[in-house]
Image: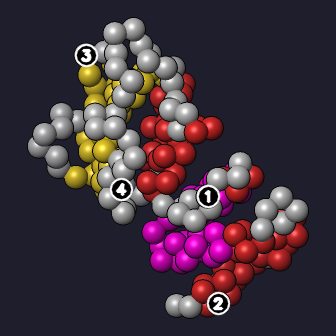
Amino acid sequence: MTAQDTHKQALKNLENAGKTTQQAIDELGQFFPAYNIATGLAEIAQTYNTGNITLPDALAQGAVLVATSVAGKRVAGALTPNRLAEDLLRPGGNLLGSVAKGATENIRTVSSAEFSNLQSQLMKLGGTQVQKPTYMGVWYELPGGGGFGVRQAKSGPTLAFDLPGFPKGFKVHQQ
């Protein structure tokens, strides 16, 4: 499928959702280049058309695209699961949470509400549950590589990550 075909399909999907690509560009174009919006929306629509995500998730990814663009971040690759995970783990460019006393920099602690929200958002990234004999919990492989795990550690609920750009052994604990 060519980029032009993808854009046409995006337009059809957006029209079905009650909004045209041109309306989105007109409303949002004052903040960032229209091409980035159209390209990103086309990628979302193409993912939706393959049946890999639901309409609410496609719209959520569109919101991430807009937020990413408004923040001035790189739009290319913004819709990959690894990129979305990175945005969740580095809000505003800094690692989320804090380092608890005695912990290393790659082990972060967040509130119960933040942990629940993070886990919920991670589960929407299209990970496939796989058996990982070396991990004592449930492991999810993300499309495009990398993954994350959920387990109950001595200290409480824990998310472990194996993602490009993150230190080996990166984890998030619930406070």
Between label 1 and label 3, give the one nearer the viewer.
Answer: 1
Q: Is residue 94 left or right of residue 59?
A: left
Location of residue 128 with respect to 167 vertically, above or below = below
Instruction: Return the residue at label 2.
Output: 4
CA neighbours of label 1 inside 10 A, class few (<14), some (14 to 19), many (20+): few
Q: CA distance from mark 1 to mark 3?
A: 38 Å
Between label 1 and label 4, give the one nearer the viewer.
Answer: 1
Q: Is residue 9 left or right of residue 115?
A: right
Specify start and end residues of the magenta stretch as a single range.
39-67
CA neighbours of label 2 inside 10 A, class few (<14), some (14 to 19), many (20+): few
Q: CA distance from mark 1 to mark 2?
A: 22 Å
Instruction: Return the residue at label 3.
Output: 154
Instruction: Return the residue at label 1.
Output: 74
Between label 1 and label 2, give the one nearer the viewer.
Answer: 1
> For numbered disc 1, what is the local secondary structure?
loop
Question: Circles 1 and 2: CB distance less than 8 Å?
Answer: no
Give whichever of discs 4 and 2 has the lower sequence position.
Answer: 2
Give whichever of discs 1 and 3 has the lower sequence position.
Answer: 1
Q: CA distance from mark 4 to mark 3?
A: 26 Å
The quarter of the displayed image where residue 63 is located: bottom right
Q: Which mark is residue 115?
A: none
42 inside magenta stretch: yes
